[in-house]
Amino acid sequence: MQLPSDFHSGISRRVLLAAGLGSTLTPQVFGQSASFPSKPIRLISGATAGSASDLIARALAEKFQLEFGVPVVVENKAGAAGAVAVQTILSAPPDGHTIFVYTAAHTVLPLISKLPYDPLRDFSAVTPLGVVPNVMVVSPNKAFKTVRDVVQAAKANPGALNYASAGTGSATHMSAEKFRIATGIDAVHVPFKGSPEAITETISGRIDWFFAPIVSALPLIKDGKLQVLAVGTPKRSDDLPNTPTTVEAGVPGSEYTFWVGMLAPSKTPKPTAKPRTTAAST
């Protein structure tokens, strides 16, 4: 099943709000430097187009372009547990013109995978961009109408149900794992290259459930292509005020919130990579 043609562009105005960034955010995330910017800026996303970090990067790119007056390009470098994107970043000149927009997977992956880089040694944090709720979604054609329906079905058929993620170690994977452990169910993890692929398979019914980033899932929930069962954060989402959290749905200890942030190679000059001081932050 194909996603709507406006899947990427149709929600760009809501992305910043959904991520907790606010509509008044301005790109004051780079320090004062006489030589910056001197060429187009590249925002490298470690996920596929339509994933949470990609959508946030694209929303920010518009603001960056207006602020700096140079082209700002979002490049998707998904694959190999983020190693493809990392290689792109680390092979570029560390001058602030190539920036990594990534998620909490940056800190999770070293715990579960052997990486060809050191997240602490090789990168410096520029600024947090916000937090993104994950929402538990299923195909409307499934018999699942509540979280309890899923849990009961999984317990009645150990190992028969499956759940998607946007890749091993991703926030969607961590959300699903916390839920699985909290419920004590046995289900099969099916990792995909990114959220759009996982969403497509969930809509088709080949995947039983997926903890999707709200910025990716919301338009499809509103169009009736996805059924939302719960929000994975400690509090309900303002975008889905009538949807319970997984804890409210009877699964204590299942909440998970992930961040999206901006990073630069650690060798980037500090006057360029450090955040500017603004009146609002003093």
Image: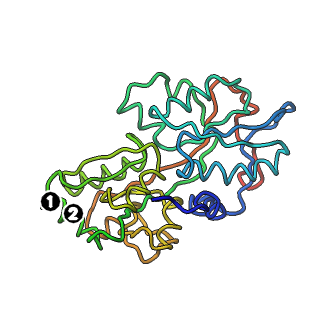
Quickly name the residue at label 2: 151
Q: Residue at x 25, y 48 (%)?
A: 188
The answer to whether residue 15 is left or right of residue 243 is right
Q: Residue at x 32, y 57 (%)?
A: 206
Q: Which mark is residue 172?
A: none
Looking at the image, which is closer to me, 89 or 8?
Answer: 8
Q: Secondary structure at mark 2?
A: helix
Disc 2 marks which amino acid?
A: Val
Q: Could you say where residue 17 lies in the image, as x and y percent from the top left?
A: 61, 63
Q: Looking at the rendering, which quadrant does residue 22 occupy?
A: bottom right
Q: Callout 2: 10 Å neighbours few (<14), some, many (20+)?
A: some
Q: Position of residue 189 (x, y in %)?
A: 29, 46
Q: Residues within 10 Å of mark 1 (few under 14, many from 20)?
A: some
Nearest the camera: 47 or 100? 47
Disc number placed over residue 155 in the picture, else none: 1
- Whether pointer 1 and pointer 2 mark residues with C-beta atoms closer than 8 Å, the reply is yes
What residue is at 79 percent from the left and 37 percent from the top?
Answer: 40
Residue ranking furthest to the bottom: 242
Displayed quadrant of residue 145: bottom left
Quadrant placement of the N terminus:
bottom left
SS at badge 1? helix
Percent coordinates x, y for residue 266 in the rendering: 62, 26
